[in-house]
C-alpha cells in the first residue's frame, strides 16, 4: 500500500484591488517604467489600503474562498499555518487571528517566518502533520502586506514588492500524490543583506530608529540576486536528483516571483522551457510568502492530476529550497 502523502486538494488566492503601477512609482522615486520592466518584469503590484485591514485579513479572504471552493466549513479545519514576515503584530501570531476571523474554532495555528521561502517551509511543515496522520485538514497560507514595511522613497525596494495572499488545503492522499520530497536550506550569515534593521529585540523602536527609516525592508539587491539564482537552481537540481528525475520529468516549475531575470536564469540553467514556468510577477510583483500559492491559484486550471511540479524560492535569512509535488486533482 502506498504511504500516506499530504496532497494539495484546493488552492485559492486574494489580492487587494488597489494597483500601484510603474507610472505611479515614477512620481514617487527616480525611476521609470522601462527600467523597472526590463530589470524586474514587473508592471504593477497590489497594495492593501482597506482601513483597519492587515495580513490576517488577506489570509482570511484567501481561506474563506478556499473553504467555499473545497466544500469545507471552518469547523472542519484542524490547523492553519501562516507564512509571513508581516504579521499583524510582533505577537500574537497571525494564524490564530485568522482562525478567529474565519470561525475555525477547532483549529490551532502558528506562523512561520522564513521570508520569501516561507510558503515552502510552511508547506513542508504542514505536510508532516498530514503524512503522519495526526491531522486530516491543514491549511497553509502564504501572505505578506509588504506595503507596511516598504520605504516608498527607496527605489531599491519599492519597485519590487506588493501585497497578497494564497492558501492551500492539505489532506491525506493514498495514491502517491502530494508532497513527495523537499530540500530546504538556510544560511544566517546572509541576514544583513535582506532584513529590517529595527523593531525586534536587537534594536527596539525608538525615535531614532524611526527617523533613520530602520523599520523598512532593506536589501543589497545585487548580492541577493546572485544568491537567489544559485540557491534556487541547486536545490531544484538536488530534489530532482534525489528522486531519480531530471527537469524533463517536470510539467511545471513554480518559482518565487522576485525578479523575472532570476526566474528566466534559473529556467535556462535547468534547460527548462519558460512556457512551463509559472509567472505572474508582472501583475503582483514580489508578495514575499504569497508568490508561490498565488501562482498555483492562477495556474490551477492548467494543472492535471499526476503533474510533477517543483516549487522553489529564495529569501531573507537567507532561506531557500525546492519542493517536489505531484498534483492530486
Ligand atoms: O524576494 C527576496 C529576494 N529578493 C530578490 O531576489 C531581489 C534580488 N535583486 C533584484 O531583483 C535586483 O538586484 C534589483 C531589481 C533590486 C536591482 O536590479 P539590478 O539590476 O541588480 O540593479 P543594480 O542595483 O545593480 O543597479 C543598476 C543601476 C544602478 O545605477 P548605476 O550605478 O549603474 O548608475 C542603480 O543606481 O540601476 C540603478 N537603479 C535604478 N534605476 C532606476 C537601481 N534601482 C533603480 C530603479 N530605477 N528603481
Image (spheres, helix red, strand yellow):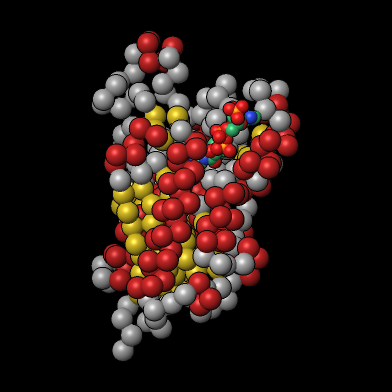
Task: Answer with left or right where residue 9 lies relative to residue 275.
Answer: left
Q: Quadrant of residue 232?
A: bottom left
- From the viewer's perspective, is residue 143 above or below residue 325? above
Residue 222, image x and y in percent?
50, 37
- From the viewer's perspective, is residue 176 above or below residue 225? below
- From the viewer's perspective, is residue 168 above or below residue 18? below
Q: Quadrant of residue 37?
A: top right
Residue 111, image x and y in percent?
34, 46
- Quadrant of the picture in which ligand 1 is shown: top right
Residue 261, image x and y in percent?
59, 49
Task: Answer with left or right where residue 113 lies relative to residue 289.
Answer: left
Task: Answer with left or right where residue 141 lies relative to residue 46.
Answer: left
Q: Residue furthest bottom?
A: 1
- From the viewer's perspective, is residue 50 above or below residue 259? above
146 or 14: nearer the viewer? 146
Q: Quadrant of residue 123?
A: bottom left
Total marks in image: 0
Please tell me which residue is depicted at 63% across the width and 70% down the height of the picture.
Answer: 302
252 or 192: nearer the viewer? 192
Quarter of the image containing the N terminus?
Answer: bottom left
Please tell me which residue is depicted at 57% across the width and 76% down the height of the picture.
Answer: 304
Please tell me which residue is depicted at 26% across the width and 25% down the height of the picture.
Answer: 202
Please tell me which residue is depicted at 57% across the width and 21% down the height of the picture.
Answer: 153
The answer to whether residue 50 is visible is: no
The answer to whether residue 324 is visible is: yes
Residue 174, image x and y in percent?
37, 82
Amino acid at each position: 500500500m502506498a504511504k500516506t502523502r499530504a496532497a494539495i486538494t484546493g488552492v485559492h488566492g486574494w489580492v487587494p484591488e488597489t494597483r500601484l503601477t510603474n507610472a505611479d512609482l515614477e512620481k514617487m522615486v527616480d525611476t521609470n517604467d522601462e527600467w523597472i520592466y526590463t530589470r524586474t518584469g514587473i508592471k504593477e503590484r497590489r497594495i492593501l489600503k482597506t482601513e483597519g485591514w492587515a495580513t490576517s485579513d488577506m489570509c482570511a479572504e484567501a481561506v474563506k474562498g478556499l473553504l467555499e471552493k473545497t466544500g469545507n466549513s471552518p469547523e472542519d479545519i484542524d490547523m492553519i499555518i501562516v507564512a509571513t514576515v508581516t504579521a499583524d503584530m510582533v505577537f500574537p501570531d497571525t494564524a490564530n487571528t485568522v482562525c478567529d476571523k474565519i470561525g475555525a474554532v477547532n483549529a490551532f495555528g502558528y506562523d512561520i517566518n522564513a521570508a520569501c521561502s516561507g510558503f515552502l517551509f510552511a508547506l513542508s511543515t504542514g505536510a508532516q502533520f498530514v503524512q503522519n496522520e495526526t491531522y486530516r485538514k491543514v491549511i497553509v497560507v502564504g501572505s505578506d502586506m509588504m506595503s507596511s514595511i516598504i520605504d516608498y522613497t527607496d527605489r531599491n525596494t519599492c519597485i519590487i514588492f506588493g501585497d497578497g495572499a494564497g492558501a492551500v488545503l492539505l489532506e491525506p492522499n493514498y495514491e502517491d500524490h502530494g508532497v513527495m520530497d523537499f530540500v530546504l536550506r538556510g544560511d544566517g550569515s546572509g541576514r544583513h543583506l535582506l532584513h529590517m534593521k529595527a523593531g525586534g529585540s536587537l534594536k527596539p523602536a525608538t525615535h531614532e530608529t524611526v527617523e533613520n527609516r530602520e523599520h523598512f525592508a532593506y536589501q543589497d539587491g545585487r548580492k541577493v540576486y546572485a544568491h537567489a539564482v544559485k540557491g534556487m537552481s541547486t536545490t531544484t537540481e538536488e530534489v530532482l536528483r534525489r528522486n531519480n528525475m531530471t527537469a524533463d520529468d517536470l510539467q511545471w516549475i513554480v518559482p518565487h516571483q522576485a525578479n523575472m531575470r532570476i526566474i528566466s536564469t534559473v529556467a535556462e540553467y535547468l534547460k527548462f522551457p519558460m512556457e512551463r514556468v509559472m509567472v505572474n510577477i508582472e501583475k503582483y510583483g514580489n508578495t514575499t510568502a504569497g508568490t508561490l500559492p498565488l501562482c498555483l491559484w492562477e495556474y490551477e486550471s492548467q494543472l492535471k492530476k499526476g503533474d510533477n511540479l517543483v516549487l522553489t524560492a529564495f529569501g531573507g535569512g537567507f532561506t531557500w529550497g525546492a519542493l517536489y509535488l505531484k498534483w492530486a486533482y
